[in-house]
Image: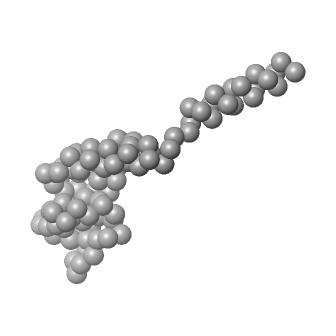
Amino acid sequence: MFWGKSALAGLAIFGLCQCSSGEEQEAAYDRAEKVAASAVAGTTYADQGSPYGCTVDCSGHDAGYAWADRNEVRDPSDCGGNSRSFIEGCMAYAEAYQAAVNDAL
């Protein structure tokens, strides 16, 4: 009987510690997004380690990365265009942003 009550008490305490309201979670995510925006603001494709590489130069990747920064692209699936390197640069920005959000959380 002792183990049963202890286990229930432990689960109750664990449950209280793990629960938070949707508003608290939303506020935490909003804070993480602000931290992430600051973390990637002003960075470049090269600052991210040129994750998709470059062919001759990185001008297309740089352009896509800068465009994503100016347009606050947050999801790699929102990247498009006519140039593979431009799209990859945009994706690198969005991926860096998402990684910064995850780190902040």
Q: Is 70 on the left-hand or right-hand side of 104?
A: left
* Outermost residue toward the bottom in this view: 82
Q: Position of residue 97 (x, y in %)?
A: 29, 53
Residue, far top: 2
Q: Quadrant of the N terminus?
A: top right
Residue 26 in percent (x, y) is at 41, 49
Give the residue displayed 67% in from the left and 31% down from the top.
Answer: 12
Depth check: give the residue in front, 35 or 87.
35
Residue in the image at 83% along x and 18% along y: 2
The number of callouts visible is 0
Quarter of the image with the C terminus is top left
When asked about the image quadrant of residue 75, the answer is bottom left
Give coordinates of residue 78: x percent, y percent.
Answer: 32, 70
Q: Is residue 94 in view from this perspective?
A: yes
In the displayed orientation, state which residue is furthest to the right. Answer: 1
Residue at 22 percent across and 62 percent down: it is 72
Instruction: Give the side of residue 20 with respect to residue 101, left or right.
Output: right
Q: Is residue 58 visible?
A: no
**Residue 20, percent across and down?**
51, 40
